[in-house]
Image (cartoon, grey):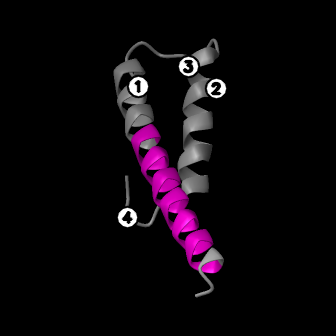
Amino acid sequence: MTDQQTYREALDELRAIHARLRSDEADIDTLLDDVKRAADLLDFCRDRLNAVGERLEQVLTDFEDGE
């Protein structure tokens, strides 16, 4: 995972891995690497979603408080 990767890029890569694993082209030799990469991407996406959710909550709280 690069520091510059966006949520959308990570999601696109996850979709590509998912499609590859579900296809007839799934390769047993790369299966473990694909699954590890998918797990890393899922962690990244979850972290980004949590961070955005927390920030949105703060913005809404500030708005409701009139700040």
> At which x and y percent is residue 34?
42, 28
User: Vertically, is 18 above or below 50?
Assistant: above
Q: Alpha-carbon neighbours of circle 1 within 10 Å: few (<14), some, or many (≥20)?
A: some
Magenta segment: does it hold 31?
Answer: no
Disc 1 versus disc 4: distance between alpha carbons? Answer: 20 Å
Q: What's drawn in magenta, residue-wise? A: 42-63
User: Which amino acid lies under the numbered mark 3 shown in the image of this protein?
Assistant: Leu
Magenta segment: does it hold 61?
Answer: yes
User: Which amino acid lies under the numbered mark 4 shown in the image of this protein?
Assistant: Asp
User: Vertically, is 42 above or below 34?
Assistant: below
User: Which amino acid lies under the numbered mark 1 shown in the image of this protein?
Assistant: Val
Give the residue drawn at x 63%, y 11%: 24
Q: Alpha-carbon neighbours of circle 2 within 10 Å: few (<14), some, or many (≥20)?
A: few
Disc 4 versus disc 2: distance between alpha carbons? Answer: 25 Å
**Which of 3/42 is in front?**
42
Q: Determine which residue is flagged by label 1.
A: 35
Q: State the image quarter where residue 17 is shown.
A: top right
Q: Residue furthest front?
A: 65
Q: Alpha-carbon neighbours of circle 4 within 10 Å: few (<14), some, or many (≥20)?
A: few
Residue 6 visible? no
> At which x and y percent is residue 42?
46, 38
Q: Determine which residue is flagged by label 3.
A: 21
User: Vertically, is 55 above or below 1?
Assistant: below
Please tell me whether mark 1 sits on a helix, a strand or a loop.
Answer: helix
Q: Determine which residue is flagged by label 2.
A: 19
User: Which amino acid lies under the numbered mark 2 shown in the image of this protein?
Assistant: Ala
The nearer-to-camera label among 3 and 4 is 4
Give the residue drawn at x 40%, y 23%: 30
User: Vertically, is 58 above or below 21?
Assistant: below
